[in-house]
């Protein structure tokens, strides 16, 4: 199921194909939610040609993608999207690249994000005992502590990483 789980290539199992599509849908919607909260986008910025196919809200879009995949894949030996929905997904991804991923306002935060990740990495290398037990068990299996710290940080959501950084480095106001 994990083989070929990347941008190019196709997973070898139906389960892998579901995970791959689910990841793509979750990734783009997580980024859209972040852009909406940051004021980089509004729902009305999303082209009408996309909204007409998959909906005008996050819930509508997610529901449409899920139902379309189930309906289109039913009775097939594959996991598929209908042509109109697949095109809308491709167009939505292109829209996100043009309006969010390369947006100067969003890009201006990259240096801060890099510093935050580097700071957390250095902290957890020095305080590896604060990493969850299930990851620390990998030390006993021979995994390098640097890899365990990377795995821990990469599992964090943006909000959790920001909260951890604040907890560790920002003094509390009394």
Image: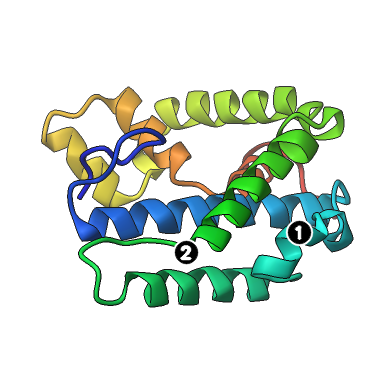
Pick the quarter of the image with the C terminus. bottom right
- Image point (67%, 50%), residue name: 92
Drawn side of residue 66 relative to residue 2, left or right: right
10 w.r.t. 67: above or below: above
**Of 22 and 142, the residue lying toward us:** 22
Q: Report x, y in % for residue 12.
A: 18, 47
Drawn side of residue 72 relative to residue 171, left or right: left
The picture quadrant where one finds residue 47 is bottom right
Q: Is residue 45 visible?
A: yes
Instruction: Give SS at disc 1.
Output: helix
The picture quadrant where one finds residue 124 is top left
Looking at the image, tell me whether mark 1 or mark 2 is earlier in sequence order: 1
**Of 17 and 30, the residue lying toward us:** 17
Q: Report x, y in % for residue 110.
A: 71, 27
160 w.r.t. 111: above or below: below
List the residue tagged with mark 1.
49
Q: Report x, y in % for residue 129.
A: 35, 40
Instruction: Give SS at disc 2.
Output: loop
- Image point (73%, 43%), residue name: 95
Q: Is residue 159 visible?
A: no
List the residue tagged with mark 2.
82
75 w.r.t. 20: above or below: below
Q: Report x, y in % for residue 21.
A: 41, 55
Q: Badge 2: few (under 14), some or many (20 or more) residues near its Cα, within 10 Å?
A: some
- Image point (38%, 44%), residue name: 131
């Amino acid at each position: 199921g994990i083989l070929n789980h990347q941008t190019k290539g196709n997973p070898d199992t139906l389960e892998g194909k579901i995970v791959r599509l689910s990841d793509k849908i979750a990734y783009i919607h997580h980024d859209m939610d972040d852009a909406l909260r940051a004021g980089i986008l509004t729902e009305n910025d999303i082209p009408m040609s996309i909204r007409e196919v998959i909906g005008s809200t996050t819930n509508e879009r997610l529901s449409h993608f899920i139902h379309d995949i189930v309906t289109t894949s039913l009775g097939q030996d594959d996991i598929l999207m209908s042509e109109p929905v697949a095109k809308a997904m491709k167009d939505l991804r292109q829209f996100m690249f043009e309006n969010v991923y390369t947006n100067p306002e969003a890009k201006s935060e990259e240096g801060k994000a890099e510093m935050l990740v580097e700071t957390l990495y250095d902290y957890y290398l020095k305080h590896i005992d604060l990493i969850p037990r299930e990851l620390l068990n990998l030390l006993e299996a021979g995994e390098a502590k640097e890899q365990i710290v990377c795995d821990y940080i990469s599992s964090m959501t943006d909000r959790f990483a920001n909260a951890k950084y604040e907890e560790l480095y920002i003094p509390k106001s009394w």
